[in-house]
Amino acid sequence: MTREELAGKTKKDLIEIAKSMGVKGTSKLTREELIEHVLLLDPPFSANPEDVKAISHHLEATIGGADSIYTQPPLPEHLSKVAVYAEAEQDIPPSYNDTRIALLVRDPYWLYTYWDINSEVKSKISQEYGDFQKIALVLRVYDVTGIDFNGHNSNYYFDININNYTNSWYINVGNPNHSFCVDIGFIKPDGSFYTIVRSNFVTTPRDNVSEVIDEEWMIIEEDFKRLYRAAGGGQGNSSLELIESLLLKLEKEMGSGAVSSLASPVKYQYQPKDRKFWFVLNTELIVYGATEPDAKVTVQGEPITLRPDGTFTMRFALPNGIQYIPVVASSADGIDTITITPIVTRETI
Amino acid sequence: MEKGFLALILHAHLPFVRHPEFPDFLEEDWFYEAITETYIPLLKVFQNLTNEGIKFRITMSVSPTLLAMFQDSLLQQRYLKKIEKLIELAEKEVERTKWLPEFHDLALMYLEHYRFCHYFFAEKYRCDLTLAFKELMEAGNLELITCGATHGFMPLMINQTAIKAQVVTAVQSHIKAFGRPPRGIWLPECGYQPGVDEILRENGIRFFFTDAHGILHASPRPKYGVFAPIYCPSGVAAFGRDLESSKQVWSADEGYPGDPFYREFYRDIGYDLEYDYIRPYLPSSGIRVQTGIKYFRITGRTMDKHPYNIWIARERAATHAGNFMFNREKQIEYIASIIDRPPIVVSPYDAELFGHWWFEGPMWLDFLIRKITFDQNTIRLISPADYLEMFPKNQVSVPSMSSWGYKGYNEVWLEGSNDWIYRHLHKAADRMVELAMNYPNASGDLRRALNQAARELLLLQSSDWAFIMKTGTMVEYAVKRTKIHINRFNQLYDQIKYNRIELGYLGELEHKDNIFPNINYQIYNPNLSTRALQPEVAATLV
């Protein structure tokens, strides 16, 4: 029930509604208080009264009829036999026989590269420099920050020796806010570097606040630190401490798109670490019977629905204690009535 | 007069999972569960507030894959069957728990909710929930924004045309569903790399979000930290996530969802009840899974869980909403004392956290909105677009590459378990661009094949697959999906290139991977401007 609907009711009606929800001392409450009580107690999922009617009407008309109220064209015949996960559908090429090296940023300090070398390129190199498989391949990583790289003017470069059995590598550049590219190649006998292919250019992100200040948007250093701290930078006093505590927070996996797979975002679950042995025991009681198909049957005073052949089955979780279960069958004309009352006791020792 | 603003962002997304070739499919349940436990409860909260005349502003991104699933008739029909089964199970539970009053009340609650879902879904919205979102948008209470077409993680794409295609397709599907272009975007996984904003600008998008350090580490240094947006050089605004408010909801140690009185997610009758009884409600393979009916509360660090009580939990949700509001008021008062304009606090969450994981989340949100409306004057709910209208002058600065993943950069999607995919993703993107340039005006079957290749590439790019490979649940499915889309794309590429399109095969793929029915492969032609591809958007660009 919404606030508006309740506001439209008389106090007498409100008292009735409040009572039916178990509110005590309703006569002492004002109209407004009654409305607040009812709103608070209104079951979180209950719909408004119109909806309740609409829902039962809707369900009577449609339940069990998903097929008829919403028709889906039948699956075309040729598809019903297709096994989508046929192994053949999962074949992917180990290589595209390209000559290519690609560079990706993992974080401010690390890059990732993968490469592929065309078989013709390999055999051409083999002709000139001997068996390709025996050539010691090298990744040459160039820092190209702020320059128009021509192959020879990098700020600095370093080499990584790799083997011929890998086709990817994580590179520790340890240098945030710098631009890089990488060549795959080898050192020729004369000591110079043979570039087989060069990668795209990437820039690592900063791991710190920018030292560039825009005069139009100045803020005093102390205030910026306060803002940084308020943004999650924690209690640190030096900017280094601030950054460390910010990164620490980020590492706590707060909302890493985790629910996108509906996989657990955060483990609230208590997982016992040491001994995992456990045991659970529950009991349920099945009560079943049969009578004339048109008879009326109640179990503990509540009417139940018979199957078309007059049989019925009830299933109850059975707690400790005594259950009296009067089952009453009455003939359709109301003349005959038979009551059977099993008494069931569960004890746990 | 308020001292500052709170922008609550709910990011709703699920990967496209639809398997017409199987009568039932386990991973499709993600979608059905999210409808019952998250989307309908949230929509209901928003509708009730709207009906009561309460004005509020919540920003919600609805990913194009989710939109496509909402609008897919096969999934709609399957959802109805699922909810019918749940109603049947809840009815049995009402009977079975008759002698256990605490459980009985809960069984009744579930029954009532499932019946409501059936009505809400089938009767009220004729099986298309996008209409409910649209209504709330039109009422002015929801700011609907878009996401990458298939949630592709942009910082790990090299081919800029492939990023453009993700954005163009997203904007098109948003317009088709909601009738107007989105003003903002949730970059998948909050993943930003400098330059992406230029593509957003071309598509009429005016704002996006980064994690806190994306703004804090922007250059030049942002005067207001994360408490005001910055403009990228392209003119698109970037808003930074506030970590303090995120932590209150997300944190495993301190977050609200861990309250002992809240419902325990892991105890479900799908696991707890006698096998033959629960069997008809399990997948056809017969493995035990979650049904959604859960009777216990978190209780504490114990295996001995106590029964859940919705009324106590509701009180806790109200208390937590009050606490959240109080903390935002204090936070905003503090920030307002440092900076010379009203601050904005941006709090984004995965929508599926609410209801599905955190059962009381929708209630909490309901209480929070009511309290903010009636109980205080310090903060006001706002959408980023409204904020930009009020404060059009903002500092120009380049955000730092960042994401909201573990450690804040790209490592979640680029590590030992999933790095193998990128050579295929990049190759497929390059090949798609090659095809689009080689066949600029295709028609007939060739056009169909090109469009389908574009669909396969987009599906391949979903960040969900790499994410699942890393997190370690359902890994096999993510690996299969990745390999299958690589395979399908490459098959189509060869068929197109060597002019031997197999119509039977093409028809089969069109039937299975039927996302984005109106896709135009020319989005992969780098020579075509966005204006040519997006006439609706071009008209709105100044």
Image (cartoon, grey):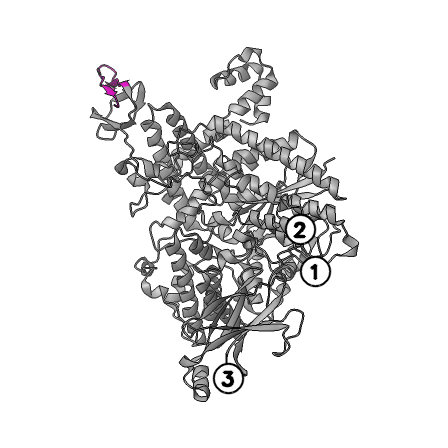
Assess whether residue B17 is covered by the magenta stretch.
no
Q: Secondary structure at mark 2?
A: helix
Query: Residue at label 2?
Result: A239
Q: Secondary structure at mark 3?
A: loop
Q: Nearer the viewer, residue B225 or B235?
A: B225
Q: Which residues are magenta?
A: A322-349
Q: Position of residue B402 (x, y in %)?
A: 59, 56
Q: With respect to residue B107, does A244 lie above or below?
A: below
Task: Answer with left or right where residue B343 lies relative to residue B164.
Answer: right
| Amino acid at circle 1 | Pro
For discs 1 and 2, the disc positioned in front in the rendered view: 2
**Which quadrant holds the N terminus of chain B?**
top right
Residues beneath discs 1 and 2 located on the same chain: no
Instruction: Please identify the residue farthest to the bottom as the structure is shown.
Output: A128
Q: With respect to residue B102, does B184 lie above or below?
A: below
Marks 3 and 2 in Cβ contact (< 8 Å): no
| Amino acid at circle 3 | Lys
Mark sitting on residue B233: 1
Q: Chain letter of disc 2?
A: A
Whole-number angstrom distance, CA of label 1 to CA of label 2: 27 Å
**Which quadrant holds the C terminus of chain B?**
bottom right
Q: Chain letter of disc 3?
A: A
Task: Answer with left or right where residue B214 lies relative to residue B94.
Answer: right
Q: Position of residue B432 (x, y in %)?
A: 50, 69
Mark sitting on residue A188: 3
Q: Nearer the viewer, residue B273 or B497?
A: B273
